[in-house]
Image (spheres, rainbow, N blue to C red):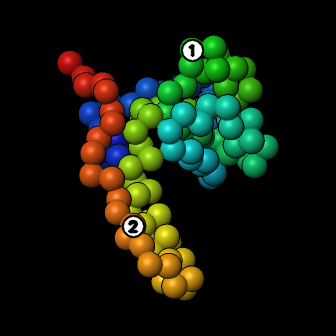
Amino acid sequence: KVKSVFDLDSVRLVRYDGANPTVSRIAICGGSGQSFYQDALAKGAQVFITGDIYYHTAQDMITDGLLAIDPGHHIEVLFIEKLLVKLTAWKEAAGWDLDILPSQSSTNPFSHL
């Protein structure tokens, strides 16, 4: 499901033997959010979706009983349109005279073979 939502060919999965396949709470953090994985655990997340998970952090996640999905760093592009709507509403409410333009460029330096 994550691959289709983010339109990706592959994702990295951090999993461990005996993990419960039934999930009721998922935490997500765009970009490199691995430093927030313990916050996700504290909020009751069983799965954490974020990019750029380091090897040793993945080992810590396994030790702490957290499944993780790493779709890559660039998943924050999903929030651009929603943020544009929110910023535009703030701009109009405040009467600011400025244009808000979402980025049209991709900064993902990686491709897959």
Q: Amino acid at mark 2?
A: Ile
Can you name the residue that lies furthest to the right here?
42
**At 62% across and 31% down in the image, what residue appears?**
34
At which x and y percent is residue 50? 53, 37
Report whether residue 110 is seen. yes
Vertical arrangement, residue 79 with respect to residue 11, above or below: below
Q: Residues within 10 Å of mark 1 (few under 14, many from 20)?
A: few
At which x and y percent is residue 95? 51, 85
Report whether residue 21 is seen. no
Local secondary structure at mark 1: helix
Q: Disc 1 designates what residue?
A: 55
- Quadrant where the C terminus sits is top left
**At 25% across and 23% down in the image, what residue appears?**
112
Q: Residues within 10 Å of mark 2 (few under 14, many from 20)?
A: few
Q: Amino acid at mark 1?
A: Tyr
Q: Quadrant of residue 102?
A: bottom left
At which x and y percent is residue 70? 47, 32
Q: What distance separates the C-alpha of mark 1 from that of mark 2?
A: 38 Å
Left or right of 86 in this view: 81? left
Looking at the image, is mark 1 or mark 2 nearer the viewer? 2
Q: Disc 2 designates what residue?
A: 100
**At 43% across and 26% down in the image, what residue appears?**
12
Left or right of 39 in this view: 86? left
